[in-house]
Image: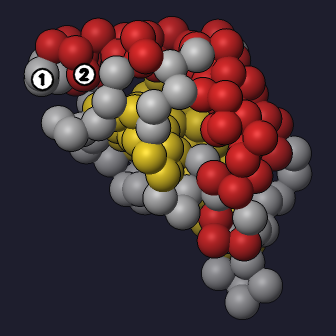
Amino acid sequence: MATTWTDGDPAAYLDAVTPAVRRRDAHTLRDLMERVTGAAPRMFGTSVIGFGEYHYEYPSGHSGHAAAAGFAPRKAASTVYLPEGVGAHADLLARLGPHTTGVGCLYLKDLERVDLAVLEEIVRRSWATVTDGTFGQRASES
């Protein structure tokens, strides 16, 4: 993910997303994350919609801040960021519906084909994990 909050307008960014299915899904993800986190959407870099912030510190001493929940509407799929790694959500991912994953990313091509209640629980768990003090786990460790 990008490393800096910007003054970009999340609503204007989402309204310009293409293709149309990605724009529809982006609005759904914004509403879902806003409901789960209670935080307003902000631009994190030029293409990530972030909610809240968490502090991380690794055993190496590297530390910083990042969006506690976030997504990016990409042309190929919507990317939901899971800082604690997708492995922490294996039980829920098995029930989610069509998706692919990276180490800390969940890729969704069409939210109408996934169980939104399951997705909401994934976001809720992730939010709780990364906002509970200083988070120091790399996504690859889950």
Label of residue 22 in the image: 2
Q: Are marks 1 and 2 in contact (CB under 8 Å)?
A: yes
| Residue 54 visible somewhere in the drawing | yes
Q: Position of residue 14 (x, y in %)?
A: 26, 19
Q: How is the image coloured?
A: secondary structure
Residue 55 quadrant: bottom right
Quadrant for residue 17, please give it: top left
Whether 8 is drawn above or below 135: the answer is: above
Q: Position of residue 10 (x, y in %)?
A: 32, 22
Front position in the image: 34 or 64: 34
Q: CA distance from mark 1 to mark 2?
A: 6 Å
Please state which amino acid type lies under the numbered disc 2. Arg
Total count of labels: 2
Vertical arrangement, residue 107 with respect to residue 139, above or below: above
Tell me if residue 25 comes above or below residue 123 in the rendering: above
* Quarter containing the N terminus: bottom left
Residue appearing at x 81%, y 45% in the figure: 129
User: Residue at 49% across / 44% down in the picture?
Assistant: 106
Q: Outermost residue, right direction?
A: 133
Q: Nearer the viewer, residue 103 or 91?
A: 91
Element assignment for label 2: helix
How busy is the neighbourhood of tag 2: few (under 14 within 10 Å), some, or many (20 plus)?
A: many
Q: Is residue 30 left or right of residue 140?
A: left
Q: Is residue 118 left or right of residue 16?
A: right
Image position of 62 (left or right of 129): left
- Amino acid under label 1? Thr
The residue lying at 45 percent from left, 31 percent from top is 98
- The residue indicated by pointer 1 is 18
